[in-house]
Image (cartoon, rainbow, N blue to C red):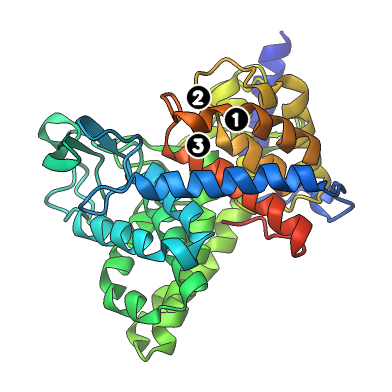
Amino acid sequence: MNKIIAFMMALYMTAVSALGFAVDAPDLEKGEGYSAEATTQQIELFTEIYETETAYLASMQLPNGALPMTYAKNGELTVNPYFADFAALALLDKAEEYADVVVGYMDWHFDHLNTAQEDFNGLDGTIYDYKVTMKNGEIVSEKISTPENADSYDTTDSYAATFLTVVNKYFYKTGDSDYLVSHAEDLKRITNVMFATLQNGLTYAKGNHRVKYLMDNCEVYEGFIAASRIFEEIVLCGKTEYTDIRDQCGEVSFIVRDNINNKLWNYVGGYYLPGITAYVKIPTKIFSWNTYYPQATSQLFPIICGVIEPDTQRAKNLYEKFCETYHWEAFDYPDAFYWGANVQAAAIMNDLESVTEYMENYKPLTEKHSWPLYNMDIARTAMAAKIMIDRNTAGDYPSCY
């Protein structure tokens, strides 16, 4: 009976949001955040992991610029552009050393954009996952990951959003506006991928899977902010034909953020709906903190992506409930992967004790980087380490990528 009541309340709150009724959200007001100062030993731990893992990510790059999930000189590798984007984001934290690696990856990404005719869903500007066959460190072949290109990506909204976040961070770190201008039209194509599945203020995952996911939309929020900044610079370089898309991206970023905090927020249960269907706007599943992925893990994404500030009561409530439910620092959860997103959220929350425990448990993995460790978890862990280093040596680090 309790599950039925919870489900009906979720339906009710989603309907209220869809009809546009405002609900006060005092838990989004800023307050006191976590406060802790790292010891010299902790900073040394974070620095070692940051240096080791960014170097390893750079060493994984293939001769054609791609950043695979794992690396081997021989055999078949998977290139997932979404995961690769996080490797690039981590490398940009050390842009003075690895900017060229990121340029190589961005060039590969641009070269592999689909036309509408090539895309499974008829959408221009998307990108597929790829399989690369290696022999003695050289590429023997590269092919789209699924037969006949059938559904060869997990999503289109997040793939576009995270790549735009990479490009924006690249410009922020290097000031290379020429690169933005030279790829302006392709950047517009990628931005339009997000617009293509935008419906009533939220994006659905892809044309053949019309579910509006919390995690995707948090990344889309960042993607529209990134696009707005990218096109602002392009306009400043004299390309005024991109003024309209710059303005649209800025406006839509706030619309997406507000819809995440309205349509996806369950005011009764105190959690975000992990996903809603595109048309009838009902939750895809009954929520439970005991369902690790995607339900519990998705609650951290509004914190990671800056949809909510880490010093708000909502962020603290979500983060603390996650920590009460899972001893994630010791990888004690029902999933084989190392979930660098967890430690990234903890670093943004400035939970020094939990970050330290995770890093101590993670450190032995750096010796071999064996599966199931892969590029996105390596990257998120490196970015978490960088957040803690910067916070304890050069002031607060921003919560965005």
Vertical side of 294 occupied by 136: above or below: below
Q: Which of the two residues, 228 or 36, is positioned nearer the viewer here?
A: 36
| Residue 262 appears anywhere in the view | no
Q: Which of the two residues, 141 or 368, is positioned nearer the viewer here?
A: 368
Does the CB distance between marks 3 and 2 fall below 8 Å?
yes
Q: Earlier in the sequence, mark 2 or mark 1?
A: 2
> Could you tell me how far apart the alpha carbons at marks 2 and 1 are, in whole angstroms?
12 Å
Q: Residues within 10 Å of mark 2 (few under 14, many from 20)?
A: few
| 104 relative to 303 in the view: left or right | left
Dot 2 amino acid type: Phe
Dot 3 amino acid type: Asp
> Could you tell me how far apart the alpha carbons at marks 3 and 2 are, in whole angstroms?
8 Å
| 46 relative to 164 in the view: left or right | right
Q: Position of residue 173 (x, y in %)?
A: 51, 70
Instruction: Kindly identify which residue carries mark 1.
Output: 362
Instruction: Kindly identify which residue carries mark 2.
Output: 337
| Quarter of the image where the C terminus is located | bottom right
Instruction: Kindly identify which residue carries mark 3.
Output: 377
| Quarter of the image where the N terminus is located | top right
> Could you tell me how far apart the alpha carbons at marks 1 and 3 are, in whole angstroms?
10 Å
Q: Position of residue 108 (x, y in %)?
A: 24, 56
Give the SS element for disc 3: helix
Does the CB distance between marks 2 and 1 fall below 8 Å?
no
Q: What residue do we see at 55% from left, 31% from top? A: 339
Dot 1 amino acid type: Tyr
Which residue extends farthest bottom? 238
Q: Position of residue 365 (x, y in %)?
A: 52, 28
Q: What residue do we see at 44% from left, 88% from top? A: 236
| Residue 298 appears anywhere in the view | yes
